[in-house]
Amino acid sequence: MPTYTAPVADIQFVLHDVLKVAGQDIPGYADLDPDFTAAVFEEAGKIASHVLAPLNRVGDVEGCMLENGVVRTPTGFRAAFEQLKAGGWPALECDPAYGGQGMPALLGTAVGEIFSAANQSFTMYHGLTHGAYSAIRSHGTAEQMATYLPKLVSCEWTGTMNLTEPHCGTDLGLMRTKAIPQADGTYRITGQKIFISAGDHDLAENVVHLVLAKIPGGPEGIKGVSLFIVPKILVSDDGALRGRNAVSVGKLEEKMGVHGNATCVMNYDEAEGYLLGAEHKGLRAMFTMMNEARLGVAMQGLAQAEAAYQNAAAYAKDRLQGRAVTGPENPDGPADPIIVHPDVRRMLLDQKAFIEGGRAFMLWGATLLDRVRRSGDAEAEGLVSLLTPVLKGFLTDKGFECTIAAQQVLGGHGYIEEWGMSQFARDARITQIYEGANGIQALDLVGRKLASDGGRHMSGFFGRVESFIGACAQKDALGEDFLDPLAAAARDLQAAAAYFLKVGMTDPNAALAGSYDFMHLLGHVALGLMWSQMADASASALAAGEGAAAFHQTKLATGRYYMARLLPATRLHLARIESGAEPVMALGAHAF
């Protein structure tokens, strides 16, 4: 059975050596000293290793069951959920006014990675609840917040988001679910939603659904969509539960992965609902939840890569097969461990270099989110808006690739279920699809975010790269190995952006045909920047004789690998972008 150990030392390094969080001017960050954060991550790591990880295989094999209208979660999930609630983990970054601990999103993101790596299916139950909490806190009335937030913060109740219908996914303007206004100010919700993660279960006494629906007579298309709170069990004015609402589970979806999470078809038959936010402005309210979820999915993709990598690396150091071409490295044994072979090293380093760079990118993104939420920083808001589709699309694409590479390291054993490697790949696969498929993320990036505010946020990202290169220009430890490759990759990114600016208005297909490559190109440059910053921190620590020398030497070697072997992918992505739309659009639909 696979095991998992939280990468506490690496998270600490990013937070304190690279991002220097305690010295940032974000409210609440001054409290994030190394001793405090280490204590949080170590405790989260214990729960992940000893409680959640052992249930990961259980959830995969057992799955969830629908019995007489009630969804049963896998053996052990309920007890683990109670343990998580008792420890206050779901409340970590929630408002103290509703029972939360008020910690920054940065801390919640790092803990989320630890829990998701141990058991993604389980962690989704309270992860989605936090999204519902955020939407109600941002758009709800005082009464709605008082009724629902304390219960969502404690996870006595859990939350969902209901968007997709059988005939429409991304194009929400086509939805048919209706909300009929009632004289008492409530609405009657009727329709069917599909793919609803954690749609029903036995972990909490109530499930609070946030449901997109159309009020008859409203504007056509997406402009006529509103958002509603539709609890599974109705709530009285005094907060007591008062009876079942007209919402039920039609069936559980049979999925490729995340079997431990109940993915439901939800039926609404004149269920009682309450408008959240303004009429016909439901998408704005739902996007509060969706943008948070997209960052959470980016974290999931990275987390599955980390879990798979840990087990692949352990196997490679233990499995004996063949001899090193330069001579035996295990002369007393019948063969050498397979980690001596260059191709195995390549697979492992591809994973390690992506994961550590991706973690820094993800945590930097969380600091930007905190800066927006806690300081109202408009520049940070624009930058995190630009980077959200890249975080979601790039980290999940590469995270899935890492799980496949980890499976490959185990060879035939990687294909056998009892070794558990296929679960990482199957669970990671959904991250590329839900909360906006990655192709949609790329279209959002190029079609909307790139030119947003006159391209100011893209220019701001370029400015950060150029500023870092300029500040480190005299540091010999960085130049040839880090700064030069980063500058070359940034030039590729600038050339791609200039191409879109040149052809986008006259040939929009050319821009959209290159959008996926642009998402990956920007992702690689972002990781190149992260690796250069980490290299700077490690080189400085070594020069000062601070910290564990082996850790920093390993960090530098891994960073050089990324810059030499992975970052040059920017040239390929640029070449594809500059080929335009013709190769993509040349075939008529009839030819496929």
Image (cartoon, rainbow, N blue to C red):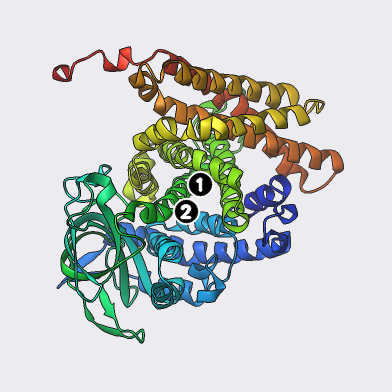
Screen quadrant of the C terminus: top left
Crowding at dot 2, Cα within 10 Å, few <14 / some 14-19 / many 20+, comes out as: many
Which residue is denoted by mark 2 in the rendering? 117
**How far across and down, in percent of the image, does residue 469 sit?**
72, 28
Q: Is residue 309 or residue 544 the one in the foreground?
A: 544
Label 2 residue SS? helix
Residue, far right: 544
Q: Is residue 413 or residue 53 the one in the foreground?
A: 53
Quarter of the image holding residue 168? top left
The amino acid sitting under disc 2 is Ala
Q: Is residue 206 or residue 262 the one in the foreground?
A: 206
Q: Which mark is residue 306?
A: 1
**How far across and down, in percent of the image, does residue 402 sit?**
45, 38
Label 1 residue SS? helix
Crowding at dot 1, Cα within 10 Å, few <14 / some 14-19 / many 20+, comes out as: many
* Left or right for 323, reference 171: right
Nearer-N-terminus badge (2/1)? 2
Quarter of the image holding residue 187? bottom left
**Label tally:** 2
Identity of the residue drawn at 31% across and 75% down: 206
**How far across and down, in percent of the image, does residue 455 sit?**
53, 30
Identity of the residue drawn at 75% across and 53% down: 23
Q: Is residue 349 visible?
A: no
Identity of the residue drawn at 57% across and 56% down: 373
The amino acid sitting under disc 1 is Glu
Mark 2 touches mark 1? (CB < 8 Å): yes
